[in-house]
Image (cartoon, helix red, strand yellow):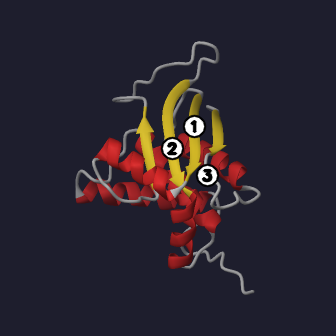
Amino acid sequence: MSKVKVMVKNNQREIKVPTGIRLLIRRCCQAVLTTEKFNQDAEVSVSFVSNSEIRSLNKIYRDKDRVTDVLSFPLGENGKYDVNKETGCALLGDVVISLETAMRQANLYGHSLEREIGFLTVHSMLHLLGYDHETTPLAERQMREKEELILGELGISREDSFVTEV
């Protein structure tokens, strides 16, 4: 089984990164590679940023002048990836998550921040592996089904509620 090295960076100050989120992200990345039968060790970078930073990146790289929840920057193309000469790992790319937007969406959808971060991580990892839900309705459905399958395997499926009464 391939292994994934995940570098998680917090580049924002608006929201404290909850305990356990870094481990959750690593578990999500590994689950995607396992499900996709990715047969090479890999590296991925995940960064938490502010809404203003993700808006700026969205404008620069996608020409969309608005806040978004997550951006994926794949380093591979057609299943071919550069390799880190020191580690031999495939360089999959970068994931950038707005922690502010993730928190807002978790509240909006009535689930935990952990479930939201898990979803965004799985979603982005699939993008790094070449999936694109914006090409056709069928591609969108296939990607959504894969996301829910992986999250279900991790025990954080859509049907589960992580909302706790205060």
Which residue is at 61% across, 42% downward?
30
Amino acid type, label 3: Gln
Which residue is at 42% across, 38% downward?
73
Quickly name the residue at label 1: 45
Look at the image and tell me in which quarter the N terminus lies: top right
Find residue 103 and report its horizontal and vertical position in percent: 58, 68
Q: For the view shown, which residue lies furthest in the left direction?
A: 136
Marks 2 and 1 sit apart, C-alpha to C-alpha, by: 6 Å
Instruction: Determine whether the residue tagged by mark 2 lies in a helix, strand or loop.
Output: strand
Find residue 104 and report its horizontal and vertical position in percent: 53, 71
Which residue is at 34% across, 42% downward?
61
Q: Nearer the viewer, mark 3 or mark 2?
A: 3
Task: Report the side of 121 relative to 74 (left or right).
Answer: right
Find residue 17 and report its horizontal and vertical position in percent: 69, 57
Quickly name the residue at label 2: 95
> Which image quarter: residue 76?
top left
Q: Is residue 117 above or below residue 30?
A: below
Marks 3 and 2 sit apart, C-alpha to C-alpha, by: 14 Å
Circles 2 and 1: CB atoms closer than 8 Å: yes
Viewer-proximal residue, 41 or 116? 116
Q: Earlier in the sequence, mark 3 or mark 2?
A: 3
Quickly name the residue at label 3: 12
Q: Is residue 30 above or below residue 92?
A: below
Task: Report the side of 37 relative to 161 (left or right).
Answer: left
Instruction: Determine whether the residue tagged by mark 1 lies in a helix, strand or loop.
Output: strand
Q: Earlier in the sequence, mark 1 or mark 3?
A: 3
Q: Is residue 13 above or below residue 73?
A: below
Q: Earlier in the sequence, mark 2 or mark 1?
A: 1
